[in-house]
Amino acid sequence: MKTVLLDSNKNFYKANMHSHSIYSDGKNTVEELKEMYMAKGYSIIAFTDHEHLIDNSRLDDENFLAITSCELAIKQFEHLSTLIKRDMKVAHLNLYSKAQHNVNTPCYSSVYDHYTDNVNDIIVAPEKDYKRVYSAEGVSEIIDIANKEGFLVAYNHPRWSLEDARDYLGYKGLWALEILNSSCWETGYYDYNPTTYDEFLRDGNVMGCVMGDDNHNSPHHSFVGYTMINAEKLEYGEIMSALENYNFYCSMGPVINGLYIEDNKAHISVDKGEKVIMTTGIRHVEKQLVTDENKQDLMFEIKDEYKYIRFDVVDKFGKRANTNAYFVDGR
């Protein structure tokens, strides 16, 4: 039986899954961001402005799609700023709406709403105020509510948030980890987190990994890490279905053209990579060099004891592409 994970016969659409505009604390309009990112080959932006869902579908055309999304914060001390109390832990979640025109923000809190000046004319704050609680149970409840209301939920930049496994392994129901946050990476917080991803996976969580710029917008924080979504068409339903079903990979530069499993063997086709590393759920990794002989099409054997497999493609500059993890038992 052949299981296609990344289909070389479908399109790959380049997406920035984390972006801020003047609708929160960014410097550019959504129109300006669209122009900037399309010039760099992007087809999709998730405008994850803080605390409010905003329908930016007016920007859509045959070559561009805006994902309705937002970023929610849950802080140890809700009335304090992370810019002032710099040792405070915080959990940041990106919510991506599976229905493009759904602008009902789950778990809205007026305590966190600091950005209404730029959005008063385009949003209506929910009448019901939700009390966010910073704890494993409190964050998990927000994730659960968002899931039930039709959202994919990603967990953002754990290093910047000052969180570790004692915190984030208690968060249940996540769809993905933001494995690279370009803004944090470029400013020295080192928020490239493959180890964190493995911690989630080895704790039994079935989830993917995405990259996003989190641009506000400094040119140094843009066009660094992106997500390549594998879908038939650039239509909202198609893109969200591909995301929900983990038909994507993320990258800083290397290209993955296809990935499938057949007869307990994984076949991966890459470009702009010098080596491919298969990480598993046990103390076992494999590395293969990309050579003229294998023509960038590599094969790895899979054993039941591996629990899961995932691939890193590394280029000559040390930049990486990351696949999602695929569990051997078919989860």
Image (cartoon, rainbow, N blue to C red):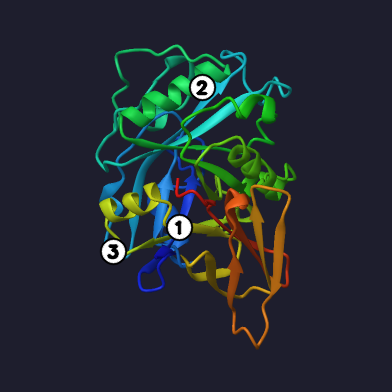
**Which residue is tagged 2?**
139
Give x and y (percent) for residue 168: 61, 29
- Position of residue 151 relative to residue 198, above or below, is above
For the point 53% across and 71% down, which residue is it?
267
Callout 1, which amino acid?
Phe
Query: Is residue 292 visible from the viewing direction of this image?
Result: yes
In this rendering, would 153 be left or right of 151? right
Q: Earlier in the sequence, mark 1 or mark 2?
A: 2
The part of the image, by quadrant, that contains residue 115 is: top left
Cα distance between the residues tagged 1 and 2:
26 Å
Give x and y (percent) for residue 75: 58, 20
Q: Which mark is residue 233?
A: 3
The part of the image, by quadrant, that contains residue 38 is: bottom left
Give x and y (percent) for residue 223: 56, 59
For the point 61% across and 25% down, which residue is it?
90
Which secondary structure lies at badge 1?
strand
Callout 3, which amino acid?
Lys
Q: Would you call the spot at circle 3 few (<14 residues within 10 Å), some (14-19), or many (20 or more)? A: some
